[in-house]
C-alpha cells in the first residue's frame, strides 16, 4: 500500500493538469527505508510528448545526488497518462528501474476527475496496490514545491488491487 | 588510484549489495569489462547484444552524460567517478513509436514551448 499526504497528491495532480495534454512526471523523495514520501520534486518531461515521458538525464543526476546527500530515496515515481487509463503501459514496465518505488499514475483524460493508481513494478511484473491518502501525516513545510493549480472537486481513487 | 563506480539499487545484486565499487580501464567499455570480471552479469545489464549502451540506463562520467562523451568509447582517467542510474521513462505509447515521433519532430525543428503557471 502507498500512504501519501493529500497535499502531495494535490501537487502531483496540479502538475499533471498544468502539463496536460503532455505527460507530466516527477518524484516524491523520502528518508531511506521509511516508505514515506515527503518531498515532491516535479521533473521536466524531456520528451515533451503527449504519449511519452523521460527525465532529463542531467536533472536526474542532480536530483538523485541530492537525495543521496540527504539520505533519501525515490519513494514515488509518478507520471500522467493524458488520454488513457492510469495503468502501466508496456513501455512503463520495460523502463521501470526502481524496484523499491511506488509507480504512481495519474490519468487526466477526464477534465473533471482524476484517476490515481499505484503499482509496484519488479522484474517486469506489475502489482497494483491501494492508495491511502493522509490528511495531516506530513509536515507541510517538508513539501518542497507546491504547484499552483486547481484542486480537484472530486477525486476517484481506484484501488482494485488486493 | 582507480575509478569509482556508483551502482543503482536495481543492479546491486551483481555487486553483493555494494553501492560503490572500483574498477579500471581507459574507456567506459574497458571499465565495464573489468567490472564484469568481478561482478559477472553486470555488463550485460548495461550493454546490448549489439554492443551499444542500453536505453534503460544513464551512465555519467563525473558530471557528464556519457552519451555526449562517445558512449562506450568515453575516455576515463584514474580518479574519475562513474555513476549509473536507471533511466526514468515511459508513457502511454509504445517506445518505438514515441522515439520515431521524437526523431521526426527533431528533424522538423519543432519544439513545444514550456508553459509556466
Image (cartoon, rainbow, N blue to C red):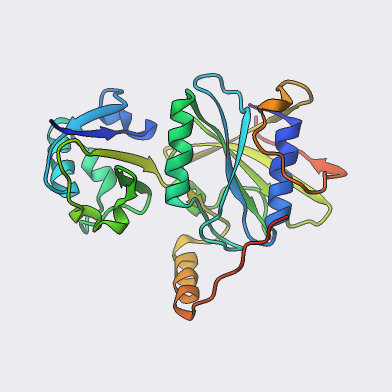
Along the line of sight, which residue is nearer the eye, A113 or A128? A113
Residue, far right: A153
Whether residue A158 is visible here, answered yes or no, is: no
Q: Quadrant of the N terminus of chain A?
A: top right
Q: Quadrant of residue B111?
A: bottom right
With respect to residue A49, does A100 lie above or below?
above
In this view, the residue in front, A109 or A9, is: A9
Give residue B60's position: percent from left, percent from top.
31, 45
Name the residue located 57 percent from the left edge and 23 percent from the top edge. Answer: A35
Q: Nearer the viewer, residue B42 or A123?
A: B42
Q: Is residue B18 left or right of residue B1?
A: right
Horizontal and vertical percent position of residue A155: 81, 42
Against B67, residue B17 (above or below) is above
Front residue of A50/A59: it is A59
| Rendered image quadrant of residue A124 | top left
* Quarter holding residue A76: top right
Residue B108 pos. (x, y %) = 49, 80
Q: Position of residue A14 (x, y in %)?
A: 74, 47
- How many numbered marks does the figure carry? 0
Q: Quadrant of the C terminus of chain A?
A: top right
Q: Residue at x 71, y 39 (%)?
A: A146
| Residue at the image position 29 percent from the left and 24 percent from the top | B18
Asked whether, in this view, residue B24 is left or right of residue A162, the answer is: left
**Residue B97 appears in the rendering:** yes
Amino acid at each position: 500500500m502507498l500512504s501519501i499526504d493529500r497535499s502531495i497528491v494535490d501537487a502531483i495532480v496540479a502538475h499533471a493538469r498544468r502539463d496536460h495534454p503532455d505527460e507530466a512526471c516527477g518524484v516524491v523523495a523520502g528518508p531511506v527505508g521509511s516508505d514515506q514520501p515527503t518531498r515532491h520534486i516535479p521533473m521536466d518531461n524531456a520528451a515533451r510528448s503527449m504519449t511519452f515521458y523521460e527525465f532529463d538525464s542531467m536533472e536526474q543526476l542532480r536530483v538523485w545526488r541530492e537525495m543521496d546527500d540527504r539520505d533519501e530515496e525515490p519513494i514515488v515515481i509518478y507520471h500522467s497518462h493524458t488520454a488513457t487509463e492510469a495503468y502501466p503501459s508496456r513501455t512503463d514496465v520495460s523502463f521501470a528501474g526502481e524496484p523499491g518505488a511506488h509507480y504512481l499514475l495519474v490519468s487526466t483524460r477526464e477534465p473533471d476527475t482524476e484517476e490515481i493508481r499505484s503499482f509496484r513494478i519488479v522484474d517486469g511484473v506489475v502489482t497494483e496496490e491501494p492508495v491511502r491518502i493522509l490528511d495531516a501525516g506530513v509536515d507541510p513545510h517538508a513539501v518542497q514545491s507546491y504547484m499552483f493549480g486547481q484542486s480537484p472537486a472530486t477525486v476517484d481513487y481506484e484501488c482494485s488491487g488486493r | 588510484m582507480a575509478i569509482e563506480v556508483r551502482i543503482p539499487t536495481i543492479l546491486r545484486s551483481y555487486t553483493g549489495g555494494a553501492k560503490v565499487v572500483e574498477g579500471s580501464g581507459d574507456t567506459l567499455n574497458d571499465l565495464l569489462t573489468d567490472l564484469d570480471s568481478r561482478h559477472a552479469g553486470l555488463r550485460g545489464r548495461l550493454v546490448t547484444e549489439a554492443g551499444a549502451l542500453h536505453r534503460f540506463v544513464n551512465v555519467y562520467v563525473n558530471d557528464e552524460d556519457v552519451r555526449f562523451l562517445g558512449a562506450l568509447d568515453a575516455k576515463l582517467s584514474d580518479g574519475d567517478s562513474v555513476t549509473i542510474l536507471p533511466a526514468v521513462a515511459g508513457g502511454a505509447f509504445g517506445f518505438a513509436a514515441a522515439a520515431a515521433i521524437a526523431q521526426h519532430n527533431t528533424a522538423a525543428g519543432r519544439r513545444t514551448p514550456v508553459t509556466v503557471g
